[in-house]
Amino acid sequence: MKKVKKAVIPAAGLGTRFLPATKAMAKEMLPIVDKPTIQFIVEEAREAGIEDILIVTGKAKRPIEDHFDSNFALEMNLKEKGKDDLFKLVTEITGLNLHFIRQSHPLGLGHAVLQAKSFVGNEPFIVMLGDDLMEDKVPLTKQLMDNYEKNHSATIAVIDVPEKDVSKYGIINPGEEIEENLFNVIDFVEKPKINESPSNMAIIGRYLLTPEIFSILENQKPGAGNEIQLTDAINTLNKTQRVFAKRFTGTRYDVGDKYGYMKTSIEYGLRHPQIKDDLKQLILDLGDEIRKQKKKVKEY
Ligand code: G1P
C-alpha cells in the first residue's frame, strides 16, 4: 500500500467575500491575529507528516509564494537587532517542500484539484481547503491518513450542520456507521436545496483521495454554480471504489466569510499571549455597553 505523503491546497479563488481587501491580495494571506490563514493549513499538513505540498494559485497570489520563502533582508535585520523570537517566527515556516502551480481559469474546485494530477501521480493524497481551520488532539489530516492505512479507501471529513445551512455545502447521504463516526456513503451531493438534502452531514475542507479521481475529473461536466465540482467527481469515484465519510469531532473554524473570520480572530486573539488580556477586557466592556443599551431600549 502506498503511503500518503502529498497534499494539495487549492488557493486560486477570487476571494470575492472579502472585497475590497482581496482586490490585490490573496485571501489566504488574511491574518488571524498575526498568522496568515494558509500558514495554519500548511502547519496542519506538516504536523500530520505530509512531505510535499502543492499550492494551486492564481492571480494576485504571489505573496503566498513569498511568505513561505526566506526573506534575507528581514532575517538579517532581525538577527542584528537581537529579535530572536521574531527571527524564529519568520524562519520556522521556510524550507518546507512547497510547490506551486497556477490555475489560469478558475472553473471550480474540481478543476483546481485536477491541476495537481502530475504532482500527485499514482498515489493517494490529501486535499485541504483554506477556508477551514481545524483543531483536534490529532490533526484532522492525520486522522484521514490513519483511516487510509486501516481501510485503504478515500475518506472525506464531514460535520453535522444546521439544516438551514445545507445548501452552502457538499452533503453526504450516509449509509451504515461502520465504526464510531465512520460512515459508508450512498451519495455525495453538492449544495442541495434544503428540502432536497439527503442529510445535514456536510463536507468540510479535508479530503483523502485516491488518484483515480483524476480521470473522473478530466471528464467531469460543470455542476452546481456551473462549476466543475469535486463533490460530483467523488460521487462517481464512490461508484467504483468505497469512499468513507469521517465525522470530525474537534473544533472547526470557518474563516471563509466575514463573520466566521471575525469570530475566529477574536477566539484566537483571546489565546494570544500579547493581546489576550486587553482583548478580554474590551469584550467585557463592550458586553456591559450592549447590555446597558438593551436595558435603555426596554425602559422606553
Ligand atoms: C467547497 C466544496 C463543498 C464543501 C465546502 C467546505 O465549497 O465544494 O462541497 O462543503 O467547500 O467548505 P465552497 O465553500 O468552495 O463553495
Image (cartoon, rainbow, N blue to C red):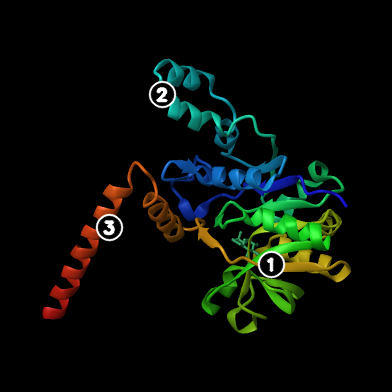
From the viewer's side, name the closer residue of 39 and 17. 39
Residue placed furthest toward the top: 80
In primary-sequence order, the first of circles 1 and 3 is 1
Q: Nearer the viewer, mark 2 or mark 3?
A: 2
At mark 1, the secondary structure is: strand
Numbered badge on residue 286: none
Q: Is mark 1 within 8 Å of ligand 1?
A: no
Label 2 amino acid?
Lys
Numbered badge on residue 283: 3
Asked if residue 181 can be seen in this view, the reply is: yes
At mark 2, the secondary structure is: loop
The structure residue drawn at horizontal position 72% and vertical position 65%, both measured from the top left corner, is: 231
Label 1 amino acid?
Lys
Numbered badge on residue 83: 2
Tell me how far mark 2 sits from mark 3, CA to CA: 31 Å
x and y, in percent, of residue 144 in the image: 71, 58
Numbered badge on residue 246: 1
The structure residue drawn at horizontal position 51% and vertical position 59%, both measured from the top left corner, is: 254
In primary-sequence order, the first of circles 2 and 3 is 2
Packing grade of label 3 (10 A; few <14, some 14-19, many >=20) is few
x and y, in percent, of residue 73 in the image: 49, 18
Where is ligand 1, by quadrant?
bottom right
The structure residue drawn at horizontal position 47% and vertical position 42%, both measured from the top left corner, is: 35
Asked if residue 107 can be seen in this view, the reply is: no
x and y, in percent, of residue 180 in the image: 68, 73
Label 3 amino acid?
Ile
At mark 3, the secondary structure is: helix
